[in-house]
Image: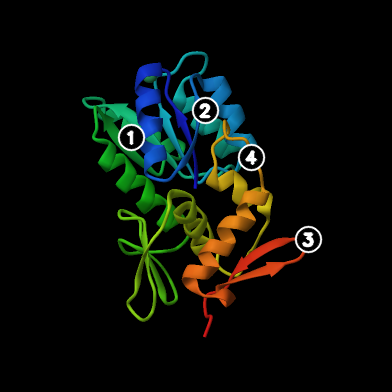
Amino acid sequence: MRLLLVEDDAALAEHLSADLERQGFAVDLAGNGVDAEFKGDMQPYDVIILDLGLPKRPGLEVLKNWRQRENRVPVIILTARDAWHERVDGFKAGADDYLCKPFHVEELVARIQALIRRSHDKTGDSLQSSDLVLDEERQQVKLPDGTMFELTGTEFRLLRCFMLHPGKILSKTRLTEHVYDQDFDRDSNLIEVYVRRLRDKLGKDRIVTRRGQGYIFTENSS
Ligand code: CA
């Protein structure tokens, strides 16, 4: 899952993005409204975390502009604790959720996960795809026979991406974008290595190779 974090407080942005990366998200940063608006239109982010008080262009205007261009990316706005009117304006402009500053990272992570599940029509507190259950907090997967497997950070990010898009062809480039952040030297051949590892854990038929196109995660492997 790829996030855009829009925050002009550099120290806060740095510490938040480190926390979010530990939770298995690839995080891009934008420090002003103009940069944020551009990036939000260019990349298919899973969620954007948008501070409203920004240099160059206010967050609210950025959000309105995205929605005017039919960019429906899920957006969580960051607002000041006592500014209820900001939250109302934010929802009117098309925000999906909000969080008051200061906040605990755990709450932000829980809101991001809930928003991602909602945007993929999934409900509940864990990510399920037919007979697999992904525990996002422990980064483990449970198989139909009850076996639990620990996943490495990369395996977890890759499997989450597959489980959110069952039955769809995912190219290596797309998977790479969702698994690594922009600073990583993106070698899409690594995806093959991690797909092989997931197949070893989940069974061979779960992830099907489409030559020249990418991979498909199949919901029923039996
Ligand atoms: Ca700010």
Which of the labelled discs sits on residue 212, or is there none?
A: 3
Please state which amino acid type lies under the numbered disc 3: Gly
For this rendering, which residue is in front, 99 or 13?
13
Q: Who comes first in sequence, dot 3 or dot 1?
A: 1
Please state which amino acid type lies under the numbered disc 4: Arg
For this rendering, which residue is in front, 146 or 10?
146
* Front label number (2 vs 1): 2
Q: Secondary structure under badge 1?
A: helix
The image quadrant in which ligand 1 is located: top left
Please state which amino acid type lies under the numbered disc 2: Val
Point 45% across, 35% down: residue: 93
Q: Secondary structure under badge 2?
A: helix
Q: Which residue is mark 2?
A: 62
- Vertical position of residue 68 compared to residue 113: above or below: above
Q: Who comes first in sequence, dot 3 or dot 2?
A: 2
Q: Which residue is mark 4?
A: 186
Point 38% across, 46% down: residue: 112
- Vertical position of residue 53 compared to residue 169: above or below: above
Q: Which residue is mark 1?
A: 88
